[in-house]
Amino acid sequence: AISSVASPGTTYTHMPLSLSLATLSLAFPLRAPPLPPRARVVASAASDDLSALGFRSAAEAAAEQRLRRSRAEEAAGGACAGPSGPASSVYLVGVGPGDVELLTVKALRLMRDADLVLYDRLISPEVLSMVGPQAAMLYVGKEAGLHTRPQEEIHRLLHLYAHAGKSVVRLKGGDPTVFGRGGEELEYLEARGVPVQIVPGITAASGIAAALRVPLTHRDYADSVRFVTGHARSENSAPVAERYRWEVLSDPSQTLVVYMGLSTLPQFADGLLQAGLDASTPAVAVQDGTTATQRVVAAPLGGLATAVEEASLASPTLVIIGRVVSLLREASAGELAAAAAAAASAAVSEADTLPEPTAAAEEARALLDSLKAGGRLR
């Protein structure tokens, strides 16, 4: 069921509508049962009609796309050719905003083949269940005022383990290079001769906006989108009012997405209002976006901070501000909750079918212990 946007300040629960990851099989594609004779005749006629309209089978479409690309490369003198060279030994992998079915196929393959996986606080249990049983897992999560390992130590761990000849996967929520410090890890490793490959993930802005049925851009509402962080570096003592170019952020023709802005939301909203953005501008704050615990608070910008405080939203919370939020629609909470629970259960069930841990896991853990014992890691 679809309902209109709740009144300002209203809190409601919204879960992602998704299918089981078990339906994705890289080795064994699903096949439909054969059609009866009469149905085959009808299907054949329909297929002819689709072919006349330009529709192709997946294999035909892939072949045509390869041909198009080869022609483009020839026309550009080979400039379109992809990268080549040895495989990277460290992978910075984005796993999306939380819904296990938003993993990319490449991320899933690397997770299942990894020897060592370093993962953050925001990685959901359902996503972690997709990691191969042979992997040694190391939690390196961070939250306000509590870092299990400083970033510099994470850098050293990635470096040392890569030189041990192991497959190292650094799992990050969302996309590793969108407010994920992936750029810092990339610079550190490449400066020390460690090859790195970045595997993009669906960033929170895209995943959460899609779950809410809110387009980030729309010809009638927003001609651009801007991502900003509400979380400053620890050494940045400047007040929120002095951190941003408010005249740029307050453009009413753009969509503004604020990552990690829960603690500074009152000051951030005030900065936009002081810069001239209308207090009635639609806005929404989303906690635990795309997961089974997602919570949504919608309110005009002028009342958003108060509504969020009254709802006691917690981190991680993403904020979307702009006229596109007026398109927000809610599906049945009960329906979506059931679908989310089923998808999570199926993901865990699929993970249970993986083989038992192998000697590679013990070897990986032994190396990690030796690094700690040698004083090279804390």
Image (spheres, rainbow, N blue to C red):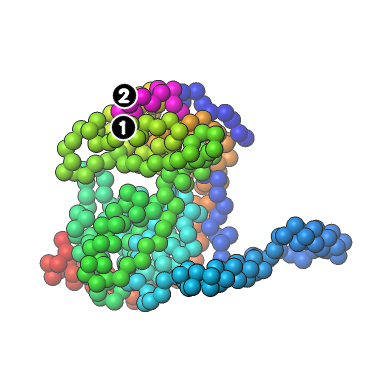
SS for tag 2? Answer: helix
Range of magenta residues:
271-283
Instruction: Farthest residue to the right: give it.
Output: 38
Q: Give the amino acid at mark 2.
A: Gln
Residue 95 on the magenta span: no
* 216 or 93: nearer the viewer: 216
Identity of the residue drawn at 74% across and 64% down: 33
> Does 365 sit above or below residue 230?
below
Where residue 83 sits: x, y (%)?
41, 71
Please name the residue shown 51% across and 47% down the image. Answer: 341
Q: Are marks 2 and 1 in contact (CB under 8 Å)?
A: yes
The disc at residue 246 is: 1
> In the structure shown, which secondary structural element does the residue marked by tag 1 occupy?
helix
Distance, label 2 to label 1, CA atoms, is 8 Å
The three-letter code of the residue at mark 1 reads: Trp
**Residue located at (13% from left, 70% from top):** 374
Is disc 2 surrounded by few (<14), some (14 to 19) or many (20+) residues within 10 Å? some
